[in-house]
Image: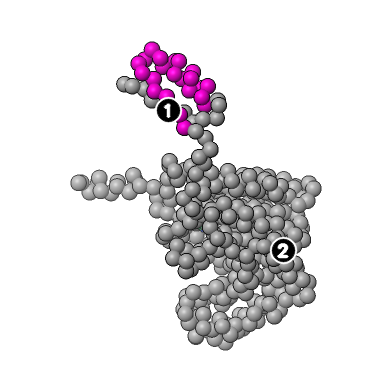
Amino acid sequence: MSSNEKNNDHLLQAPRGTRDFVGDTYDRKADFYRQAEAIARGYGFTGIETPVFEHTEIFTKGVGEGTDIVDKEMYNFTTAGGDRLTLRPEGTAAVMRAYIEHGMGSMPQPLYLYYTGPFFRHEKPQKGRYRQLYQFGLEVMGGKNPMYDILTIKTGYNILKTSGREISVQVNTLGSVSERQNYLEILKKFYQEHQSQLAESDQYRIETNPLRILDSKEPSTKTINEKAPLLQDQLGEASKAYFDAVTKGLEDLGIPYEVVPSLVRGLDYYEHTVFEYVTKDEQGANSLALGGGGRYDGLAEMIGHKESVPAVGLGLGVDRILEVAHDDAYLDTSRKKVSIIAIGDKVIGEAIKIAGIVAGSGCEVLMQATD
Ligand code: AMP
């Protein structure tokens, strides 16, 4: 093989971290979307589709500098006209941009929105991690009441249950922005005092994003974290009451949940409720995150709106859901398959006519010609 041919080998493979959906993999994804949309619509959500790219600042200001997504994972590009754009790494900030742009705040509140589609993160490709990933998202915009948090969690839970897997919810509160700010100062001071004992990869986060250190998987950091101050001790009565209402709602609905104080979700726009859905991996050991979300009352102002828009939402990881789902979860077997073979050119027209009648009765027709 010439070196030229060899160099071109990669052209015939999808770029790293991306894949093709064809046959069963296509059908299962489509069926997941069909079921998820039906459930979301049942709870009053309607669809929204935003562009796959946005102005870069929507994400740098919304998701926040110092987060993995913004610092390392975004696909940024500059157009011939000089616009700085980014392939969307997540959905919430773009949906909020659309809400503001179209003055949706003057419509009856809150708005219940869902979306589906591809998102882009330049992550190290590995099992279950893609650079073009798919999410199903829900956003309730323009409402501040624990009911909306509970309803969002419940709708996502019902969608995930279609996978046939045991699902549980990890939930936490980040308190209000000022409580969190206060806490961040306390936390920064604590980590500064223990800087040399932290894993090296965590030390630089003390200034940029100390909350993320709480999430660290590094053994030395984990040991320090056992003594770290807790946000829960900085919460005022109102924040505690809000969170109690959310957990009581989950209890009333019989949704299995656990309060996990180290859950921070690592995106700047979250406050008060944050949550993640988990299921056990195949060995029944580690828990695998299938999606997550939270409340983001300050996001609208972060991306330049004059008023805050109280809102709560979630994103479900479609790739992972399809990977862990039971075999029969997303196979739509309700439509009968009918094979029609046209024997000889003379009957082609008649055969296609018959195919139309059969398809019209709700079957899937597969036609073949004898050549
Ligand atoms: P996040 O909002 O970042 O927690 O993403 C929500 C869900 O999307 C996660 O719980 C994962 O299931 C899924 N997800 C995130 N990043 C990726 C990725 N690179 N590849 C596949 N799924 C992902």
Residue 368 occupies quadrant:
top left
In this view, 272 is above or below 313 = below
Q: Where, quadrant-wise, is the C terminus in this rendering?
A: top left
- The residue sitting at 43% across, 50% down in the picture is 18
Q: Earlier in the sequence, mark 2 or mark 1?
A: 2
The kind of residue tagged 1 is Ser
| Range covered by the magenta-colored residues | 337-359
Is 125 in front, or is 74?
A: 125
Query: Percent from the top left, x then y, of residue 250?
Result: 69, 64
Residue 293 occupies quadrant:
bottom right
Q: Are marks 2 and 1 in contact (CB under 8 Å)?
A: no
Question: Disc 2 marks which residue?
Answer: 252
The kind of residue tagged 2 is Asp
Callout 2 environment at 10 Å: few (<14), some (14 to 19), or many (20+)?
A: few
State the CA–CA distance, disc 2 to disc 1: 50 Å
Callout 1 environment at 10 Å: few (<14), some (14 to 19), or many (20+)?
A: few
The stretch drawn in magenta includes residue 353:
yes
In this view, 299 is above or below 228 = above
Element class at badge 1: strand
Question: Disc 1 marks which residue?
Answer: 339
